Image (tube, helix red, strand yellow):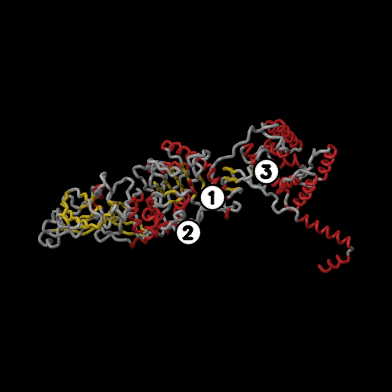
Amino acid sequence: MGAKIIKYFKQLSITRKVILILITILVIAYIFCLPRQLFHVPYSTVVTDRNGELLGARIASDGQWRFPPRTTTPEKVKQCLITFEDRHFYHHWGVNPVSTGRAAYQNLKNKRIVSGGSTLTMQTIRLARNESRTFGEKFIEMILATRLEFRASKEKILSMYVSHAPFGGNVVGLDAAAWRYFGHSAEELSWAEAAMLAVLPNAPAMIHLSKSRQSLLNKRNRLLKQLRERKIIDSSTYELAISEPLPDEPHSLPQIAPHLVSRFYQERNGKYSVSTIDRGIQSQIENAAERWSNEFNRSDIRNLAILVIDIRTNQVVAYCGNVNFERKQSGNQVDVIQAPRSTGSILKPFLYYAMLQEGSLLPHTLLPDIPININGFTPQNFSLQFEGAVPASEALARSLNIPAVTMLQKYGVPKFHTFLRQIGLKTINRPASHYGLSLILGGAEATLWDVTNTYAHMGRSLLQLPQTECSLLLSDTEDSENSEAVTSAKTTDVFQPGAVWQTFNALTEVNRPEEIDWKSIPSMHPIAWKTGTSHGFRDAWAVGVTPHYAVGVWVGNATGEGKPGLVGARTAGPVLFDIFSLLPPTQWFKRPENVFVKAEVCRKSGHLKGRFCEETDTLLILPAGLKTEACPYHHLITLSADETHRIYENCANLEPTIQKSWFTLPPVWEWYYRQHHPEYSPLLPFKPGCGEDALQPMQFIYPPMNARIVLPKQMDGSPGYMTAELAHGNPATTIFWHLDNTYLTQTQDFHKISLQPTPGKHSLTAVDSAGNTVTTTFYINPL
């Protein structure tokens, strides 16, 4: 075939060859004359809720309100545009010869341009090229218009036109015009509104809401009359339409979820984003946030953030990054949901979960709540009190700091640091050694986004749902898979339902004295919830989970300024419950099946049943919990027949005795435990002359072994004092104190002494009246 064409071309005369070449060039030029992308303009960033309702928008970089292009045109707008601009739109190929000829005749006759004769297709080309209006340019528009007709459908051409037509001022495109002039979407336009917008692009600079209003009204009504005459609308619709007044002034665009809109402006600039937000829920949450913000402002607490995730779909339904976005002060425009903040106690449930899952803890295992000093780190409970020993579940529910630190010390900081990274806390990005044991008390920073998502993942594990990524965009949104704003960081299936179930059960019991008693609220269903307060009262947290929602709340000052009343239990906690009262209530999670085993557990210690445990409960625990330590606190002791003294074995054959199981805690634990548990019975003393105590009856409270101490200077510059304290199981005993083998003094009842040791290593020894001895070593660091 190709050879025949070449042979035919060779036989042609030179003139015909030239003509054929020119025709070929013209055809090729015509085919490629239209750019692949017609419009090269910036667009506004537009965000809607999950149902397409506008949440907000940000202006395009050129200062124009130009929404991203439409793919369809509302029927009313379509009928008005075609009637007004191009009645033969569906019958020509881009150029209407009759209209063009008539326009040329009128322009030549008047020696100026009085009629354009342009079709909607030609006007689309003119909008794309944005060149001066000349006869030469008109010719180019005609050629490109015919080419556009071959490339795009009539509907596509009409959509391009309405998306880029000027509507006066800095309003470009149908969508921006509908919202700016009428305060609603283009799909909701009435006939009168559609007719007004149809006539505006004809002369947007001369006819506007603020000038020539009568001329605009006349043009609109003439178009409505034409619609009636063409039977597009009936007489009653026409009468209603012409009675509608013109809008008085442009409307402000909605400002719902403004921080989310700003986030999309940064991450999806110039795109149309259909978010997962539920506008109804969002509006209720914003109203609640404003109400609470007004309350907190009295205490000079100025910022508040709320995140609500539907854990069944793993989609965000409410995103309140802060309050009072319109006020450009006090950090109100900071999106706190994305801002790293000190975590306070909000990470404690993750440690509790990890230790349950690994089998190093049972839910109610007793943990020490005593003064501790670990290389100079001396954590305190919020109440500044000690209880000696507390069940792990209660320690979590009450957010006690000292048990949490001892748990982390046992579990290991590096291992917990790795676990936190695995579950998606991306901002904990420094080495584990940087955080140390303070990691569990707020020594690290996390975002409300990451924290709430992690709690949501725990809830999803109980619902047996995959740990998919949390979404901010609906999955069918264009380019959603490439957007950083779509999802949180990927996570693996780290959480297992059994340990999550036990953790959530502990968190449903949260009810500290300073917190809300949610159980007293009749309409409130169970919620697993946790609060947190950072050091210096800078950040207040509250996170709650039900089988339907995960809610995260942060309260504070974006500037990092602390306030005495800024406590999670008193600020973020009440907000959390207010939010849950706005959400549909749900029943509690179902207990996971086939993940627990039955075990005998000591009722007093929470450990597996030991040899001498008499009071036990049959509980469901994780299989890994079977390897935990059996109860170490119950001992078999020998008592005199009247149960007033203990009897040592060398006296047991000389008088009647009985054997009994006895619950005994370490001395320091016991010292504080007895103050809160009057039912606790300390070990009875030995009968005089009948042996010594095999269980150590005393223990140093301070200083702990190998403590490094700096003595503060007194007012006169001399070294200060340290106070040594000891706990003994027998309050009536006498303690004899020795420092570096030198006798100091003796104490009764309250065993405390003040010391002024010199710099260096020291040994402090205490001996009780029964001859029991305990020693601790400490170091005094020079100033």
- Mark 2 and mark 1: Cα distance apart in space: 19 Å
- Quarter of the image where the N terminus is located: bottom right
- Secondary structure at badge 1 equals loop
The amino acid at mark 3 is Pro
Decide which of tag 2 and tag 1 comes sooner along the chain: 1
Name the spot of residue 378 as percent of width and height, x first. Answer: 31, 51
The amino acid at mark 1 is Leu
Decide which of tag 1 and tag 3 comes sooner along the chain: 3
Q: Which residue is mark 3?
A: 74
- Mark 2 and mark 3: Cα distance apart in space: 45 Å
- Secondary structure at badge 3 equals loop
- Check disc 1: other Cα within 10 Å, few if <14, some if 14-19, many if 20+: many
Q: Is residue 733 visible?
A: no
Tell whether 26 sits left or right of 584.
Answer: right
Q: Which residue is mark 1?
A: 472
Q: Is residue 650 visible?
A: yes
Circles 2 and 1, Cβ within 8 Å, touching? The answer is no
- Secondary structure at badge 2 equals loop
The front one of 134 and 441 is: 134
**Residue 492 marker:** 2
Name the spot of residue 152 as percent of width and height, x first. Answer: 72, 51
The amino acid at mark 2 is Thr
- Mark 1 and mark 3: Cα distance apart in space: 28 Å
**Residue occupying image coordinates x 71% and y 42%:** 78
